[in-house]
Image (cartoon, rainbow, N blue to C red):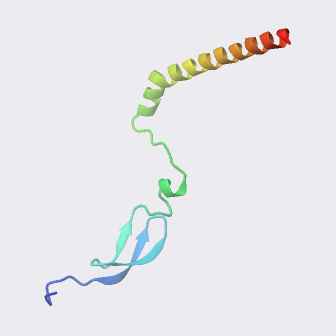
Amino acid sequence: MKPGIHPNYAEIDVRCACGATWKSFSTKDELHLDICNNCHPFYTGRQKLIDTEGRVERFTKRFGTQTLEGSKKQAEANQAAKAAKAKKSGASA
């Protein structure tokens, strides 16, 4: 490596908005992060659905209730078929 052309690569403190700190190496003096593995929803398992401008509600209104109603009708039909089959097998036994 040529001397004098490379930036200083030193150990620094990395700080997250959640308060977590750790040591790392960087060419910057210090790093401030918005999110880290301690507070990121993917790693913590606490995913939140962010509704921007009511889009989720609009989608649910358009498609969610239809899908749920269709699933309910399907489930009721399956239960009725099972009940009829059980009644039929119980009568023949």
Identify whether 9 is placed above or below 87.
below
Q: How many marks?
A: 0
Residue placed furthest toward the front: 93
Seen at 15% across and 90% down, the residue is 3
Seen at 83% across and 9% down, the residue is 92
Q: Could you tell me residue 67's position as x and y percent? A: 52, 22
Q: Quadrant of the C terminus?
A: top right
Identify whether 48 is placed above or below 80.
below
Query: In terms of depth relative to the viewer, which is nearer, 13 or 91?
Result: 91
Query: In terms of depth relative to the viewer, which is nearer, 91 or 71?
Result: 91
Query: In terms of depth relative to the viewer, which is nearer, 9 or 91?
Result: 91
Q: Could you tell me residue 87's position as x and y percent? A: 80, 11
Residue placed furthest toward the bottom: 3
Residue 73 relative to residue 67: left or right: right
Seen at 83% across and 13% down, the residue is 90
Residue 30 relative to residue 4: left or right: right
Seen at 49% across and 54% down, the residue is 41
Residue 53 relative to residue 71: left or right: left
Q: Quadrant of the N terminus?
A: bottom left
Query: In terms of depth relative to the viewer, which is nearer, 91 or 13?
Result: 91
Rendered image quadrant of residue 70 = top right
Q: Could you tell me residue 76's position as x and y percent? A: 66, 16
Residue 86 relative to residue 12: left or right: right
Rendered image quadrant of residue 24 = bottom left
